[in-house]
Image: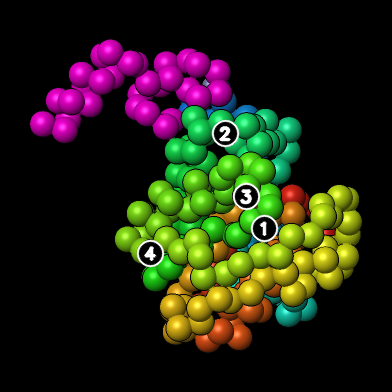
Amino acid sequence: MVKLFNQFLNFIFPPTCPICGESVGSYGMLCARCWSGFNWISNPKCFKCGYPFPADLDLGPTPMCPHCAAGENDLDYIRSACVYDDVSKNIMLPFKHASALKYQTIMSRAMINAIRDLNLDVDIVMPVPLAWRRLFKRGYNQATLLARPIAKHFNAKLDVDTISRKYKPDMGHKNAKQRRENVRGVFKVLNPDKIRGKKILLVDDVMTSGATFYELNRILRKAGVSAVYAVSFCRVVHAI
Ligand SMILES: [Zn+2]
Ligand SMILES: [Zn+2]
């Protein structure tokens, strides 16, 4: 019945690529040309934070980037679907600022794919919180829009109110150390009983230096969670 209904829907509203409008096989798919324009992250990559290494490097089964090797990343795993570049920026920025909801499915699906091979056991999916002032201005948290289908995929609880975030002015183009200092102390666990002993997957649209994930990890561990994973749609990749 559902299949029949889908066929009917495909007939009335043929599925199209949300970027270029080309017809595609099913809803929420990109056409082959747009798909190939993205810099999707595959192996080899840092097994802790997902930092992509050049394709021709053979680094063994569990390669680690210098940051993770230096103990700077205490999350269990971080993954991102693609590199932040002009192509990913072109869908991420409208999604963040202009409610371009047509990208929600392709972004969240790409994120689910990026963590598939980790076979994670997730209790709670938590979008990176926005300060209420930003939420009020924008009307929605773009990370929540991505977290909702991801929570559904894991059959996990979507949690948007256990952590609050203090408003701080934009960080601009700061280096990793300054970003870390800027985000320190902005999050607060309002209800530790809800998350103690749980495995938590953090969700954001973009990872810049990782400072936000690191700080959330710090306060979540303090609140007694048992594992912290994070996934973003894209990530800024600097040469290391
Ligand atoms: Zn297309
Ligand atoms: Zn790493």
Q: Is residue 107 left or right of residue 120?
A: right
Which residue does the numbered mark 3 point to in the structure image?
Answer: 135
In this picture, residue 125 sits left or right of residue 25: right
Q: Is residue 18 magenta?
A: yes
Which residue has dot 4 on it? Answer: 157
Q: Residues within 10 Å of mark 2 (few under 14, many from 20)?
A: some
Q: Quadrant of the N terminus?
A: top left
Q: Is residue 93 above or below residue 232?
A: above
**The residue stretch that appears in magenta:** 1-29
- Contact (CB < 8 A) between labels 3 and 4? no
In terms of sequence position, does the residue under pointer 4 or pointer 2 come before the other?
2
In reply to whether residue 3 is colored magenta, the answer given is yes
Side (left or right) of 6 relative to 136: left
* Residue 210, percent from left and from top: 72, 63
- Which quarter of the rendered picture does the C terminus lie within? bottom right
- At 60% from the left and 60% from the top, the residue drawn is 129
Q: Residue at x 50, y 61 (%)?
A: 160
